[in-house]
């Protein structure tokens, strides 16, 4: 049986800090993948000269398009160099939101990217993937080890350390799974709003009937902050309804464009996130949680 000591963690230079934290927590050696970009944008990658039988690749998949090509090149090369078991640790997993064709001809990227990853890796570990219409990560990525962790509890820890018994608010129905889990961890109250999306940047938010947020310290909790419009509208609604304060806690701090400024302008005080994506708002490190998941794969 292969042991965790017989495993190496590969990473790219731009994620050295995060990968090193994971390697230390899991008791692994880490090695960087050299990366060179030619003038025509082609990539030249160089792995260590030799690899053990078990390899872990760390790559968070925000801004994913080029990174997916990197995964293909690394996984195929590692296999030819003798790696027998490949695990991808992708704290943020891209292309999971498009899980259905809403109009004729739309590409269902979740299924296609999931099958692509399943063709490269024996295991995938991620955090709070956007799985709306399926129950497990294995349905999207059919590999022997498909592990979806959650940052909700860690974000709840941060929230209660800064606010006395905050009211947790989910900005839409999809957020219920994370908000409910976070609330149960500390016995907090929570509500879930309803969202009507018109396009990527136009949304309406409605508080649930009978919700009373007056005087409450509200923390809006969600898996992803991307354009910021959903969080901004939710913040405006709870403040208009009498909340004493509103903060935001998210697993994945994408914050595209002026998203953070938009959220601040809506009246949000603090913004807390995990380090699944490196951002100034990072308040939680997920390395210990990822390391335990890696150890479970090795023990299996």
Image: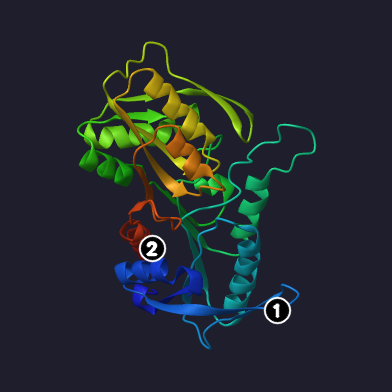
| Residue 289 spot, x, y in % from top left | 33, 56
Residue at 19%, 33% in the rendered image: 164
- Considering every residue shown, the one lying at the far bottom of the view is 49
Residue at 45%, 41% in the rendered image: 223
* Distance of label 1 from label 2 (alpha carbons): 34 Å
> Dot 1 lies on which element?
loop
Q: Quadrant of the C terminus?
A: bottom left
- Badge nearest the viewer, 1 or 2: 1
Locate residue 295: give its quadrant.
Answer: bottom left
Q: Residues within 10 Å of mark 1 (few under 14, many from 20)?
A: few
Query: Is 121 above or below relative to 140?
Result: below
Residue at 27%, 45% in the rendered image: 158
> Dot 2 lies on which element?
helix
Residue at 56%, 45% in the rendered image: 139
Q: In the image, 29: left or right of 10?
A: left
- Residue that carries the numbered disc 1 in the rendered image: 38
| Residue 26 spot, x, y in % from top left | 33, 68
Q: Is residue 189 visible?
A: yes
Q: Is residue 12 visible?
A: no
- Residue that carries the numbered disc 2 in the rendered image: 294
- Considering every residue shown, the one lying at the far right of the view is 105
Q: Quadrant of the N terminus?
A: bottom left
Nearest the viewer among 218 and 146 is: 218
């Amino acid at each position: 049986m292969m042991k965790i000591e017989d495993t190496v963690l590969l990473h790219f230079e731009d994620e050295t800090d995060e990968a090193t934290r994971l390697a230390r927590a899991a008791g692994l050696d880490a090695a960087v993948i050299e990366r060179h970009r030619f003038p025509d944008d082609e990539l030249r990658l160089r792995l260590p000269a030799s690899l053990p039988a078990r390899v872990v690749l760390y790559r968070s998949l925000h801004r994913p398009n080029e990174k997916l090509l990197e995964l293909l090149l690394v996984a195929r090369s590692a296999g030819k160099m003798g790696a027998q078991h490949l695990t991808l640790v992708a704290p943020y997993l891209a292309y999971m939101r498009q899980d259905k064709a809403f109009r004729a001809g739309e590409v269902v990227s979740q299924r296609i990217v999931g099958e692509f990853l399943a063709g490269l890796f024996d295991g995938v570990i991620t955090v709070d993937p956007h799985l709306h219409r399926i129950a497990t990560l294995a349905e999207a990525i059919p590999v022997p080890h498909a592990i979806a962790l959650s940052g909700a509890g860690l974000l709840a820890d941060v929230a209660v350390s800064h606010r006395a018994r905050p009211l947790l608010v989910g900005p839409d129905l999809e957020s219920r799974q994370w908000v409910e889990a976070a609330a149960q961890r500390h016995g907090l109250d929570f509500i879930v709003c309803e969202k009507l999306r018109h396009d990527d940047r136009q949304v309406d938010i409605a508080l649930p009937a009978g919700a009373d947020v007056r005087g409450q310290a509200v923390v809006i909790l969600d898996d992803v902050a991307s354009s910021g419009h959903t969080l901004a509208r939710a913040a405006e609604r709870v403040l208009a309804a009498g909340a004493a304060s509103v903060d935001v806690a998210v697993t994945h701090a994408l914050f595209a464009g002026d998203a953070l400024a938009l959220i601040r302008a809506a009246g949000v005080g603090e913004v807390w996130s995990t380090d699944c994506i490196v951002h100034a708002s990072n308040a939680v490190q997920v390395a210990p949680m990822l390391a335990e998941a890696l150890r479970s794969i090795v023990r299996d």
